[in-house]
Image (spheres, helix red, strand yellow):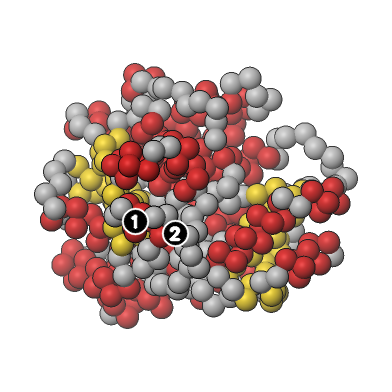
Amino acid sequence: MPESLPRLSIAKFASGENLAQTARRLLAPFFAGDALEPQLGDITDSALNFEAPLRELATPRDYLLELFHGPTTAFKDFGARFLAACMRRLPRDAAQPLTILVATSGDTGAAVAAAFHKLPGFRVVILYPDGRVSPRQAHQLGCFGDNVTTLKVDGTFDDCQGLVKQALADTELQARAPLSSANSISLGRLLPQMSYYAQASLAHYRDNDNVLNFVVPTGNLGNALACILARAIGLPIGEIVLATNANATLSEFFDGGDYHPRAGIGTLANAMDIGAPSNFERLRWLYPDDAGLRAAFTAIRIDDDAIRETIGRRYRQHGEILCPHTACAVNALEQVRKRGAEGDWAAVATANAAKFDTVVEPLISKQVPMPPALAELLDSPSHAEALDADYAALLKRLES
């Protein structure tokens, strides 16, 4: 974590700025005195050159923050592209490539691969849990080639994440083959994700003179933590509700139980299938007292039956097409409203529903429109190598 968090007033941000301009102002304090400070504007302009629109839902005072308009149609594009734009500008030994090692539960790997694809001096190694991502996600993960290697691991996302953490902590390996991370372990990916919360909340505040509350679907807590940090540094953000799937680690804790990480279980919202969220440690850094942490947030657990019901019903009633993760957020928002919540609320839409056609299409009885960026990736050949969930096996592959 940063040693301290800046405080930024609403007046610091000009009206009508695009996402890249908002990000530049938001991130300037974190870059102060850094070698990349003079290039921050170029970094944000090149990395965040697509929008994150806030659209009205059919239900009054409810909104959808759409984060799926990047090159791999998922919110992970924001952080991955920003991180790559930073790292390509850092001085390093050109003779020794840097390996970006990434564990993915579905969307992170493709976003990182796209951001670093064919970038000189970089290799990308993706680990994903075999059989636990959607077919189109799996195709995306393996379709890049060139400097991208994709490994399908016989295990869960938590197994993949554990292997990545072990490799990053292996000093002997680092000496032979330098590694870096592009998971939400990396602040270089986490901090720029604040930008879309900043832009949406600032625009909403100016237009409506009230704060915007958010429901964030989350597994590893990275996207939610970005919203939490944006609020902590002064953006006009109200309540933040965490929407989880059937993996109960977070919901149990916020309901008053002990924090009990465990193996992730497979659900329809597979990118959230995480039983040991990495960023919980950062959340505790912000709120060292468990009672204070529980008082600050609510976590609502949505099981697969509720995901199916929400996708089908919202389409029949309102024509809305939701991915399973977005459906978790929308269902949680509906529950918050039933409990009497007032004000303006935005559910966060993390991926395009077309990535989950095998789940969504049978529930809405129609084909999900295919975004051109996704169609282009799916037209490319795809390949992934099998890997046991064993560090020795990963070590051998990395050193080859």
Can I make out residue 82 in this image? Answer: no
Which residue is under mark 1? Answer: 257
* Residue 23 in the image, given as x and y percentages of width and height: 47, 32
* Residue 318 in the image, given as x and y percentages of width and height: 18, 63
Which residue is under mark 2? Answer: 260
* Residue 243 in the image, given as x and y percentages of width and height: 33, 56
- Looking at the image, which is closer to me, 4 or 9? 4
Tell me the quarter of the image containing the N terminus: top right
Amino acid type, callout 1 = Gly
Alpha carbon distance from label 2 to label 1 = 8 Å
Q: Is residue 63 above or below residue 235?
A: below
Q: Is residue 18 above or below residue 57?
A: above
The residue drawn where x is 45% and y is 73% is 266
Query: With 338 as the anchor, is 205 left or right in this view?
Result: right
Tell me the quarter of the image containing the C terminus: bottom right
Can I make out residue 393 in this image? Answer: yes
Classify mark 1: residues with Cα within 10 Å, few (<14), some (14-19) or many (20+). Answer: few
Amino acid type, callout 2 = His
- Looking at the image, which is closer to me, 185 or 323? 185
Give residue 240's quadrant in the image.
Answer: top left
